[in-house]
Amino acid sequence: MSSKLAGMGYEVPIDELEIRASRAGGPGGQHVNTSATRVEVRWNVQASPSLTARQRERILTRLESRIGRDGVLRVVAGARRSQGQNRDAAIVRLRDLVTDALHVPKTRRPTAPTKASIEKRLQNKRQRSRRKADRKPPGSDE
């Protein structure tokens, strides 16, 4: 992995991340019971000097359910067999979360229908009306 957690418009040095390894739970036999392969990556969003105030606010609001009261964003990976693979997976997951949280969608600007599309819609309405009128028996005034 690189020495930075980077995405669109932000860079976080890896030393801002707290990486802990522990034993993974669940099935897996002897290897799981003796190896510390589960990795937890913690990043204090509130105290990070790598973010602007706007970025920090956006992350705190968008990832509110994933950030603890202490302002720490926590990601856990334990699916892989080695600690290194789980560390890389957790860092990638953290990067993806932060990148998604910082993404600002474009604002939709409503457009007016063109004259041609208005005329086409009215033409279709007239045609449909004539078709329905032609279905009626001659001389009926309904």
Image: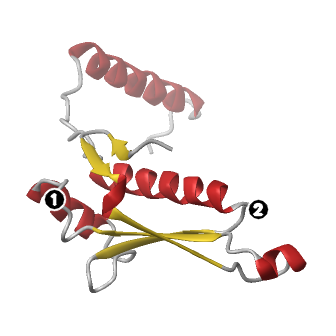
Where is 105 relative to 15, above or below? above
- Residue 126: which quarter of the image? top left
Packing grade of label 1 (10 A; few <14, some 14-19, many >=20) is few
Residue in view at x 18 percent, y 35 percent: 109
Residue at the extreme bottom of the image, as rendered:
69
Q: Secondary structure at mark 2?
A: loop
At which x and y percent is residue 124?
42, 23
At which x and y percent is residue 129?
44, 30
Q: Is residue 116 visible?
A: yes
Packing grade of label 2 (10 A; few <14, some 14-19, many >=20) is some
Nearer-the-camera pick, 73 or 99: 73
Residue at the extreme left of the image, as rendered:
53
Q: Amino acid at mark 2?
A: Arg
The residue under label 2 is 81
Task: Tell me the distance, in whole angstroms, between the alpha carbons under discs 1 and 2.
Answer: 34 Å
Q: Secondary structure at mark 1?
A: loop
The residue under label 1 is 49
Where is 64 relative to 109, above or below? below
At which x and y percent is residue 127?
45, 21
Q: Is residue 28 visible?
A: no
Residue in view at x 33 percent, y 82 percent: 68
Nearer-the-camera pick, 119 or 104: 104
* Sequence-first disc among 1 and 2: 1
Nearer-the-camera pick, 41 or 61: 41
